[in-house]
Amino acid sequence: MKLPKISNININIKNEDLHNMQILHLSDLHINKRTSIENIKTLVDICNNIKYDILVITGDIIDCKVKKIQNLLKILNNLEKVYYISGNHDLFYGIKDLEKILDNFNFIDNKTLFIKYNDKNIAIAGLSDRFSKFFKIKRDENKIINFLKKNKNSILLAHQPKDYNFAVNTNTNLFLCGHTHGGQIFPFHYLVKLVQPFLNGLHYKKNSAIYVNKGLGTWGIDFRYKANNEITLIKLIHK
């Protein structure tokens, strides 16, 4: 995992209560036995030297069994104000074990909560990954939909871009996801586009802003081409 420079992006939103809120967005770390301790420590240092209101991780922290990389994962507990949802790899390799070891994280699969920002309640909801059904985990979609509809200041986290409709149909201000790796290796971009509505980057649909993070790690081949990895600092701008 080669760590990139911070990408700064402004996202326009229609809700003034979220104006100037800063969100540090990570995704798809894919930590495995080949990942170095130095890389994880550096990642934590980079994040902790950034001023942000919340840090979100949109799935796929692990790419092997938790017991094989416990020393690496424990370092991540030095991150602060983290809200995290599962990815398909997390489910496959052991989401319950991951949740236990990342005890400083807010694990919000199928959960809803509020945080305070400028004395306003900001609603945050998380959906477990679409592969949940294969692991006998129920995605409580109705719970998430009803919660988002009731709150004008809202952020939805999910792993796959396919879930953007939950944000658009509930007028959620911001939807954050990952999963695609931005295609990882060109020309696989075109294959990803066949199965996902967005490849990477910023999109707007109705009243919702959508950001697809290209992720940090890799899957399969430890290589990227025309799909650089990213650590993204998002600033919400009322416009």
Image: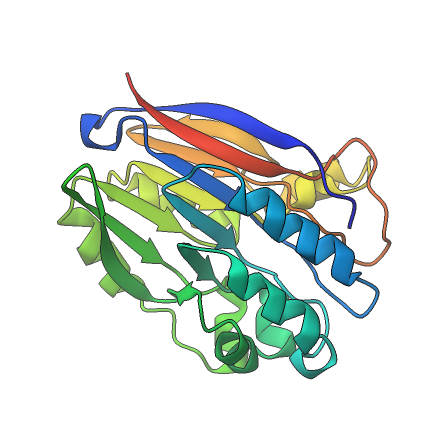
Q: Position of residue 70 (x, y in %)?
A: 66, 77
Task: Tally the marks.
Answer: 0
Q: Quadrant of residue 47?
A: top right
At a point 61% along the width and 62% down the height, the residue shown is 61
Check the image and name the residue furthest to the top: 239
Query: Vertically, is 67 above or below 145?
Result: below
Query: Residue at the location (34% across, 67% down)?
Result: 110
- Is residue 179 shown to the viewer in this render? no
Q: Position of residue 155 (x, y in %)?
A: 32, 45
Residue 164: image quadrant is top left
Near-viewer residue (202 or 77):
77
Q: Residue at x 31, y 28 (%)?
A: 206
The answer to whether 9 is drawn above or below residue 183 in the figure is above
Q: Is residue 118 visible?
A: yes
76 or 201: nearer the viewer: 76
| x, y percent for residue 36 | 80, 61
- Asked if residue 149 lies left or right of residue 227, the reply is left
- Please name the residue shown 47% across and 28% down the image: 203
Q: Nearer the viewer, residue 174 or 188?
A: 174
Residue 223: where, in percent of width, then height? 86, 46
Q: Is residue 70 left or right of residue 2?
A: left
Where 36 falls versus 205 (above or below)? below
Q: How is the image coloured?
A: rainbow
Q: Quadrant of the C terminus?
A: top left
Foreground pick, 191 / 56:
56
